[in-house]
Amino acid sequence: MDEERRGFFTGNAAYILWGLLTLYWHELTGLDAFGLIAWRIVWSVVVLAVLLTFMKRWSDLRGVLTRRRIGPITVAAIALATNWTTYVWCVTHGHVVETALGYFLAPIGLVLVGVVMFHEQLRRAQIVALVLCGLAVIVLAVGYGSPPYFALLIAVSWTIYGVSKKRAALPPLEGLAAETLVLVPLAVVVLLVMQAGGNASLEGATTVQLVLVPLTGLVTTVPLLLFASSARRIKLAMLGWLQYWVPTINLVLGVAVYDESMPASRIAGFALVWIALALITVDGLHASRTTPSPPVETEPVPLEG
């Protein structure tokens, strides 16, 4: 399997897993979202430490954590934490459909940044899909009936994270480990402050929830590593289109499983996105078979500045 096709399939796997994780996070409803994200960061560090030890890659991680790279890593880490927190809060507070809207918006940001910053060329099918998705977002936003603040925050934070990962081109495992290590001091502070304030992060948790919280490290790490691997192998525009798996799955879950409303405007927007997704999927498979793969960077490329 060539590099572009491998990136296409790992990207699909990452986004499908992210969509299905809504079921997982919904089971943690009732717990504080900020506390959940703090535990998510802590347990992710634990899982990544085990992987680094097993694969004997600690020296590679030290090579990533240089003074010149710490800035881009910090930007990616902050964007990731912002996205996580917003998404988990929405899922645990009955706003699954709004997360879908946010993830409908995010690919457009990635595609536009890919064209403007990385001079990527759009194929005809991608241009048609971009127009369809733009129409879908307008329909969904109007139908939502109020400014979708959380959706916009999800879209912007994920776009920033995607761009940071693409430009930095860090090895997947070491890059994610560096990001979570940057965040872990803040996560520990959040947990200590909550404990000292009498609002323990896991207060009121059920037995099932106490089991699920430590597993957040594993369910976080697997799709992120798949995403990081994909980001190094395929164009940002294609990576953006694959994003539509997440809102599609979230919208279905929000309506079919969690009984959130589905007016005609959302049905129309959903249909437009599915048409665009079908176009991009077929186009991506065709391109992976007919276009020679570009050389894959073997060394991390730091952000300029």
Image (tube, grey):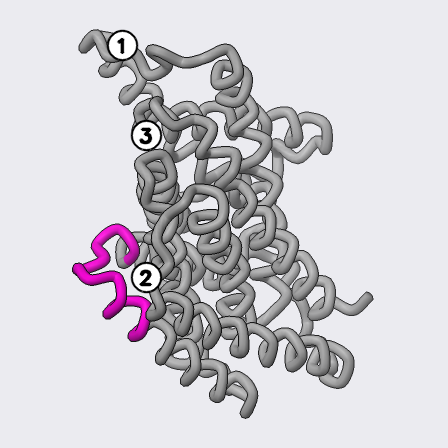
Q: Which residues are magenta?
A: 138-151
Tell which tag, 2 or 1, sits nearer the viewer. Answer: 1
> Which residue is disc 1 drawn over?
195
Q: Residue at x 60, y 57 (%)?
A: 299
Tell which tag, 3 or 1, sits nearer the viewer. Answer: 3
Q: Earlier in the sequence, mark 2 or mark 1?
A: 1
> Which residue is disc 2 drawn over?
305
Residue 250, image x, y percentages: 47, 51
Say if the magenta span includes residue 281.
Answer: no
> Which residue is disc 3 drawn over?
33
Say if the magenta span includes residue 147.
Answer: yes
Quadrant holding the C terminus:
bottom left
Q: Earlier in the sequence, mark 3 or mark 1?
A: 3
> In the figure, is residue 195 to the left or right of 231?
left
Which residue is nearer to you in this view: 168 or 205? 205
CA separation in Å, label 3 and label 2: 34 Å
Residue 162, image x, y percentages: 44, 59
